[in-house]
Image (cartoon, grey):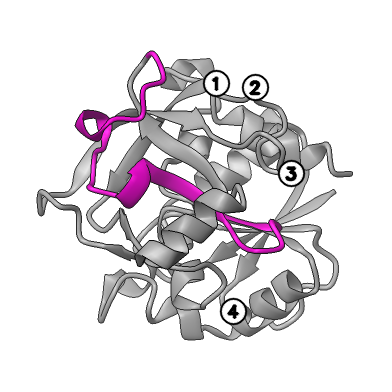
Amino acid sequence: MKFGVVVFPGSNCDHDTYHVLKKVVGAKVEYIWHKETTLNYFDVIILPGGFSYGDYLRVGAVARFSPVMREVIKFANSGGLVLGICNGFQVLLEAGLLPGSLITNDHLRFRCQDVYIKVANNKTCFSRSYESGQVLKMPIAHYSGNYFADKETLKMLEGTERIVFQYCSLDGNVIPEENPNGSMLNIAGILNEKKNILGMMPHPERAAEKILGSEDGLGIFNSLLRES
């Protein structure tokens, strides 16, 4: 299983993600520069968090037109596994690989804190190392993490089990009081129709070592490794 971590100008979690894959879980991994046009030798592509192109115009809107994204779209459409974390999630939405959009947090503030998320679907290649309903602790760091979609899209996401993670309380209650950004249905992570693409706002790479206060993010990477 070979991982590729895309590096856009402004990415700031690329090294974190690379470190976890190489040093913590022992996977094969390489950086992918945003001008790269060949992804044939990777099994999993990760779009990391950060502020690609300074978040100018709109978060993820400029990165969506980087040369590498043409290849990411081809890779995803052919069944390749793609994980977008925070800004990577925003880029995937801008590229049309996931439905809906991420808008400004409802409180109009940048939110950087640990949150709890519930595993709503553990039958995916990204979440199979978790138990159904398991509560995970991971950090968020975003200003535009408020997931928005129309009623038909939300109903479709629920009906096809494409909501993977939801913000919740420590005891697993999915309630508005535990929603850090106003996301509809407390959505923290969703899948595409073929379920080979996951976009999520919390940072699993920042919750993969005990020294960081949580190892709950490791399940994402270990789940992907089980695909090999």
- Identify the mark nearer the N-term, 1 or 3: 3
Q: Which residue is disc 4 drawn over? A: 69
Kindly identify the residue that appears in the image at 84 percent across and 73 percent down: 40
Q: Tell me the CA gap for discs 1 and 3.
A: 16 Å
Residue 175 position in % (x across, y down): 28, 30
Q: Which residues are magenta?
A: 171-198
From the image, state whether disc 4 or disc 2 is nearer to you.
Answer: 2
Label 1 element class: loop
In the picture of the structure, the residue carrying the numbered disc 3 is 125
Tag 2: Cα neighbours inside 10 Å, few (<14), some, or many (≥20)?
Answer: some
Residue type at mark 4 is Met
Kindly state the secondary structure of the residue where label 2 is placed: loop
- Residue identifier under label 2: 131
- Which residue appears farthest toward the right when viewing the image? 228
Instruction: Report the disc number at residue 116.
Output: none
**Residue that carries the numbered disc 1 in the rendered image:** 134
Dot 2 or dot 3, earlier in sequence: 3
Position of 176 relative to 61 (above/below): above
Q: CA distance from mark 4 to mark 2?
A: 33 Å
Return the residue nearer the eye: 79 or 52: 79
